[in-house]
Amino acid sequence: MSDTAVPSALKRWFVLHFAADWLFAIPLFVAPRAFLGALGWREIDPISSRLVAAALIGIGTQSLLSRNNSVESYRALLELKILWSASATLGLVWSALDGGPAMTWAFVCVFAGFNALWSYWRWRLRRS
């Protein structure tokens, strides 16, 4: 892979990531109690929920806006996504073990899956 080529599959993952982030961010931002309550959460802090939604909106939107950027831009964004998904996975595991709702484990899987995906692509781009 040349240093100027971003694989089309990675571009598609960035667009899919935008859609996934917005799919969860909008209800989390607009109606955190109803959304999280439906997923089994008993204790809901709308301020923290909206902060998470804002992070999802920001990272997801940047994924869409950057889909045609350079390899260097992708490398930087992948590093951000790796840090975000790794720390989110750790926090979610901790919360699940601390008595969080069963649905927490589904979010652990989502964030861990994205972490593996972004780590793979960062490794691929490192080789170029």
Image: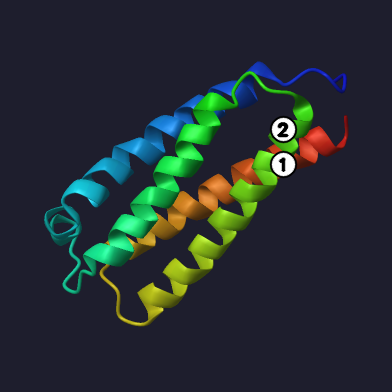
Find disc 2 in the rendering and name its residue.
Answer: 73
The residue positioned 78% from the left and 35% from the top of the image is 124
Q: Callout 2 environment at 10 Å: few (<14), some (14 to 19), or many (20+)?
A: few
Identity, as a three-letter code, of the amino acid under mark 1: Ala
Determine whether, in the image, residue 51 is placed left or right of residue 120: left
SS at badge 2? helix
Distance from label 2 to label 1 (Cα)?
A: 5 Å
Q: Are marks 2 and 1 in contact (CB under 8 Å)?
A: yes
For the C terminus, the quadrant is: top right
Query: Up-down: is 20 above or below 69?
Result: below
Q: Which quadrant of the view contains residue 120? A: top right
The structure residue drawn at horizontal position 37% and vertical position 62%, both measured from the top left corner, is 105
The answer to whether 94 appears left or right of 124 in the picture is: left
Evaluate whether residue 106 shows in this view: no
Q: 128 and 46: which one is in front?
A: 46
Which residue does the numbered mark 1 point to in the structure image? 76
In the figure, 16 relative to 108: above or below? above
| Residue type at the position of mark 2 | Ser
Q: Is residue 120 left or right of residue 45?
A: right
Q: Which class describes the residues within 10 Å of circle 1: few (<14), some (14-19), or many (20+)?
A: few
Compared with 122, 42 (above or below) is below
